[in-house]
Image (spheres, rainbow, N blue to C red):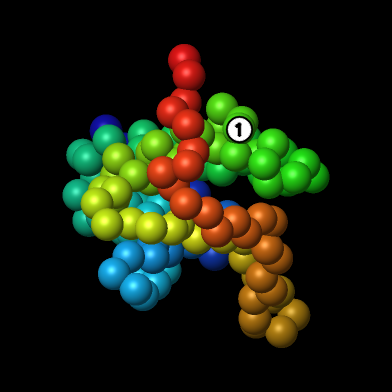
Amino acid sequence: MVVGPFFYESQIKSSSHLDIKFYADGRWSLGKEVRMEDFEKYKRVPWRYDLLKRNDFEEYAVYKVQSLKKKDFEAVKRSKAFRELNQFILRQYGDSGVDSVSLQHFIKVYLPESDSFRYDTVFAYTYSPHEIGAAKR
């Protein structure tokens, strides 16, 4: 039996990241990159396949929201993908006392010639999570 991941980290040139911050009790939390945290947990405990499934869903929702980026935020907030992402975030991290959520989706690109990284923001939204309707099935 071979347990993944099935790639070489040295070959990765770009990676997608979603930074999540919460505003509660008058201050912003530190940013969380949940996919990275879950992946690190998975590497330590590879039978926790549920962590990969959760990451897959977050990535699906982020890319669906990304495809709407040219629309105004009001249209994005009404989209099924954004509502699903918002529900997922609140379900995973709790919504008690959270006044606002800040999402920043960015791509981190490795530049081998300078051994450095470039960050490209794909979307950034700050909003009240309780104003977002439930995702419809």
* Residue in the picture at 45% in, 57% down: 101
Q: How many marks?
A: 1
Q: Which residue is mark 1?
A: 78
Residue 86, quarter of the rendered image: top left
Q: Position of residue 39 (x, y in %)?
A: 35, 53
Residue 90, image x and y in percent? 34, 44
Residue 129 percent location from the top left of the image: 44, 47
Say which quadrant the N terminus sits in.
Answer: top left
**Is there any visible trace of residue 103 in the rendered image?**
no
Amino acid under disc 1: Arg
- Does residue 120 appear to the left or right of 54 in the view shown? right
- In the rendered image, the residue lying farthest to the top is 137
124 displayed left or right of 102: right
**In this view, 13 is above or below 81:** below
* As drawn, 71 above or below 113: above
Between 14 and 104, the residue placed more toward the observer is 104
Question: Is 131 situated left or right of 39 in this image?
Answer: right
Q: Residue at x 77, y 41 (%)?
A: 71
Q: Is residue 57 above or below residue 120?
A: above
Residue at image x 65%, y 82%?
115
Secondary element at image label 1: helix
Residue 98 in the image, given as x and y percentages of width and height? 33, 57
